[in-house]
Image (cartoon, grey):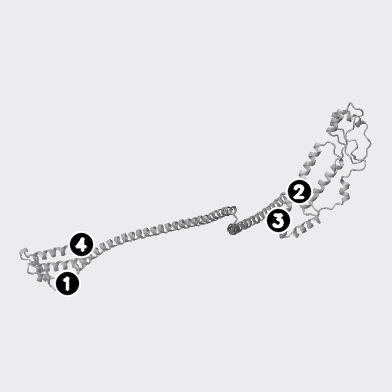
Amino acid sequence: MAEPRRGAEPLWRTPPGRLAPPHVYRMAGALGAELRRLSARFGPEAVAGLGPPVVRLLELLEALVAPAGAEGEAAAPPAGRQDAEDPERRLWEAERRERALHGRLARLEEQNRQLLGQLAESQSQEDSTARKERELMLRLKEVVDRQRDELRAQAHEIVCKSRDTEAVSVWELVGVVCEGPGDLLSRHLPLGLSWRLLQEQLHRFMSMNEDLRHKVAVVQAQLKSALEKKSDLEAMMLQTQREMNRRSRTASEIQRPKPSLEGAPSPTEEPQHQDADAGRSPAHCCFSKEELQQILQERNELKTNLFLVQEELAYYQRELLNKERVPSFFLDAMKSTIKRQRKKIRAKMLGTAEESASSDEDEGSWLPARGADCVDAQPPESKIRTFFGPWYQGSSKDPPASSCSGAWEIIDSLDTQLEREGESQAAAGSPDRATPPL
């Protein structure tokens, strides 16, 4: 260790004018050894920033000291010193290249991102352009199809109008020819033309008939489906109403207080009700479509009959209010008729068999009893007779002999006028008697 130091002292004391490249190389070797020693002692981080500046200064010093003709000698330094300088130089150059590569890599990544963005924009523009072109083509196709359909319809209409115009013109020509002189050509020409025109008209009528039949078939199918839907809805509504009624009855039975011991049913009656309820299967609660249609038809018939009976009853009531004297057999007949109608309606509503009554009972129910109520019997006192005092003064006192002949005495307004005019005549004329047909 002492020898390098003794040899190094004159090296560092060499004057500047005598410096040569070998001196510089020795300085570089000494400095490199010292830096390696420091890095081994304190770590490579301690001399990391000192190596490049020292190398740069030595290079400058070499360039200043080297003579002009000694380039070849400077280019070939000693092998040992070159080997000592190579690791630091390679390390520095590697770091420099690494930094350059990192910068270049960053620039390339930025350029790549820019290129990717431009590519995405171009692709989106191409996609939007293709989509717009596709939409435009679809719209153009729709317009062309619509115009083609319109042209076809107009062409068909023009053909039909031309046929009609031709037919009218031919018929006019036929009329002119028929009015002209009756030669052979004028006799045979209208026949052929009329035959062709009749064929064309027949063809048009057949096509129109076919179209109308097709439309009627479509309408009938729609009507049939609508009727089926209506019947189904009515059936569902009826079933829902029946279910609601059943639930309401069940709720009312649940809310009904328990009867006392006196009103409690006998033990023999309870099993009968239970058996009757158990005998009703769930199938009896539902009805088929035909049964529901029949029920609806019967309901409509019952409504119609009820309306007719109500109208008839209102008519009879108006007749009773307008007339004071009504024979009792007529009232009995009305009562019996209304009773029979009520029985029929009740039987139809309950679905039971109508009670058959004998003709004798029907006839005897409204015929008057002998001597009980006769038409000529004395009626109840009426206020209307007070206005006709001269004619009814003796009638109330001396009633005529009762005879159940079935006649009803009616005083007409014309008869009263005749009576007033014939007061001066002898033996005032009795009013005419009219027998209303039954």
- Residue on which the image places disc 4: 49
Residue 193 location in percent, x, y?
58, 58
- Residue on which the image places disc 2: 305
Residue 114 vertical placement versus 339 (above, below): below
- Distance from Cα at disc 2 to Cα at disc 4: 123 Å
Q: Amino acid at mark 4?
A: Gly
- Residue on which the image places disc 1: 83
Image-based side of 188 in relation to 349, left or right: left
Q: Secondary structure at mark 1?
A: helix
Looking at the image, is mark 1 or mark 3 earlier in the sequence?
A: 1
Asked whether the beta carbons under mark 2 and mark 3 sit within 8 Å of each other, the answer is no
**Nearest the camera: 349 or 410?**
410
Say which of marks 3 and 4 sits in front: 3
Residue 335 is drawn in which quadrant?
top right
Residue 293 image label: 3
Residue 137 location in percent, x, y?
43, 58
Q: Residue at x 31, y 61 (%)?
A: 115
Q: Amino acid at mark 1?
A: Asp
